Image (cartoon, coloured by chain):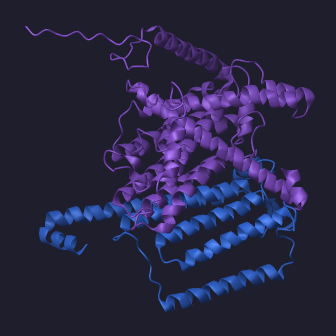
Amino acid sequence: MTLQAFLFYIIAGLTGLCAISVVVTQNIVRAAAWLLFTLAGVAGILFMLGANFVGATQLLVYVGGTLVLVVFGVMLTAQGPFITMKTGAAEWGISTVVGLLLYGVLAVALLTKPMNFGPEKEVQQEMTSTTTLGESLMSIDGATPKANLTGVPGEKQRTAVGYLLPFEIVSVHLLVVLIGAAYLARAKRRRQTESRQLAPRVEASTRGAS
Amino acid sequence: VSDLFQRIGLSEPLAGFLAAFIAGFLIIFGFLLVSAIFSVWLERKVAARIQDRLGPTRVGGKFGWLQTLADGLKLLCKEDLVPKDADHVLFRIGPYVALASTALAFIVLPFGNGVVPVDLNVAVFFMLAVMSTEIFGVILGGYGSGSKWAVFGAMREAAQIVSYEVPMAICVLVPVIVAGTMKLSTFGKDQSGFFWNWYVFHDPFTFATFWTYFACATASCKRAPFDLAEAESELVAGFHTEYSGFRWLIFFMAEYGSMVAVSGIAILLFLGGWNTGLLWFDPAQLLYDWTGEQTIGWFLGNLLLNVPVFIAKCYLLVFVMMWVRWTLPRLRIDQVMMTCLKYFLPISCFLLLGVSVWQVGLAPWTPWFKYPMALACVGLFVAMVVKAVRTPSTLPVAGLSGMWNVPAPKYEMVRKP
């Protein structure tokens, strides 16, 4: 067993254990803590594969951003000191079935392909430069991966496909989400002020309900 | 060490790995520990001198060098408390998450020419990413304490860091655009030579970015005036209210470690890395080029010049952070958020835009900017030092016996008429 394989099995095993703990534990913040270790483990595997940029992005976006926001949300909305989730038997059953199905799909997809990957294979230690990544993101010709275009006959079929268009689509989508969130947050406040002006009694009753 | 492991019967790569693991562990944690001990002593001394006190004077000679060691010993001997209402797992995990993320940041930080454990090509990005997980330890510890003060501190911390990460990352992008790389060792090599080669003097935008970055970095280390997470005037001690002894010590090792780490990023990105700025060549690089390999000359050049210079520069910035802490009053939490979202974020976006325009269109003007700017800055610095030295200093009014070589003041009885 090579060193790579040894480390891979240790990190993968720990990551798997943490992932199981995320599902099993009932305390939400503890689940978030386990999720932290799971994501860090996945980042560790990415670093081992030489995908430093993806690994660092994983840490920055999911651990530093998303996970902190999850815990932040829990702290803002919690009524008691430590909130726990009670999971019913039906929910356990459904989620087990869904999980097993997903696992089956992945296992079949892995096993039907020839095994030309895995920890035993030598991995490239480090990418020489991230310049290629940046250039292909900016759709500079020559750096971008080639792909087949449908409906284009002959020689010109293989053409450069940049990531600029998907990137722009995603960013516009995020902008829409941001504006929507801001709109929702503002609209609620406006309705409250209107109701306060029109009918003080209604406002008092809603305050009691909330 | 590798030989030792091989003699025990381990295979060669595994033995090498274990040796590297132990060496890296010892070096990084040794550095973190020593720098934390030194920083705590420095902090107390700086605070004392700014407040016209003496600070620690008794333990370890005239300057109280060993005060922190004595404090550390006291903390280690303290009872290991976990509050009854705390979430035991989270309470115990918190400090270690914080320390681990800070220690991880150091594995890509070059201390000299080629003196870096892992020379990653996305080193800056890696450091920012890893250090962003440090707050998770704080949040887990604060939330797991089961105390309202700790939860308030952790919540403020979460809000503050998530906001300040954005302008800080944008500020880091500015020198990255100038240098065209995210590899920290390349930053160091590109800025060798005299100090006007440093990126802080490259153009007006990098000059402004340095200050913005430094303010954001201070906030992201939760240092005053942004230390709302542990505001002792309102939240007892914030997120570490319930901590004592060893775990509290670990939180502080993480905080001082991250101060050195963000200062190290600032030094490498803006202030010339390990170069003195007073020599026209880098001795280690010269010997490396001459012999073509990492020989004893390269080693000595790094050991005697580059690494001490880098650490001294880091501590200069750490000292500025302390200076700021003991000079400025703490902001309110809404002022902290406003400073970030209304000022630092637009400023950093503008600087990013500006440096892009400079690099595309105005790059030939760089020499016209950097020489006057660098000379003006150094001239201002020298003038301030000269003024500070020439201003007559005043001794404390009341003599402390044994501390100052001045005769104790003679008190005269005032006769009442």
Above or below for B398 versus B86? above
Query: Residue B203 at x, y = what percent?
Result: 60, 26
Query: Residue B276 at x, y = what percent?
Result: 69, 23
Depth check, front residue: B3 or A167: B3
Q: Is residue B225 visible?
A: yes
Q: What residue is rendered at 70% in x and 35% in y?
A: B179
How many numbered marks, from 0 up? 0
Q: What residue is rendered at 48% in x and 36% in y?
A: B215
Depth check, front residue: B401 or B137: B401
Q: Residue A36 lies in what quarter of the image? A: bottom right
Q: Colour of chain B?
A: purple
Q: Is residue B390 left or right of residue B149?
A: right
Q: Is residue B350 visible?
A: no
Depth check, front residue: A53 or B58: B58
Query: Residue B244 at x, y = what percent?
Result: 45, 53
Depth check, front residue: A41 or B11: B11
Q: Residue furthest left?
A: B417
Q: What residue is rendered at 41% in x and 32% in y?
A: B326
Q: Quadrant location of the C terminus of chain B?
A: top left
Q: What residue is rendered at 57% in x and 68% in y?
A: A35
Which chain wears blue? A
Query: Residue A198 at x, y = what percent?
Result: 14, 66
Q: Residue furthest right?
A: B291
Q: Is residue A48 left or right of residue A114?
A: left
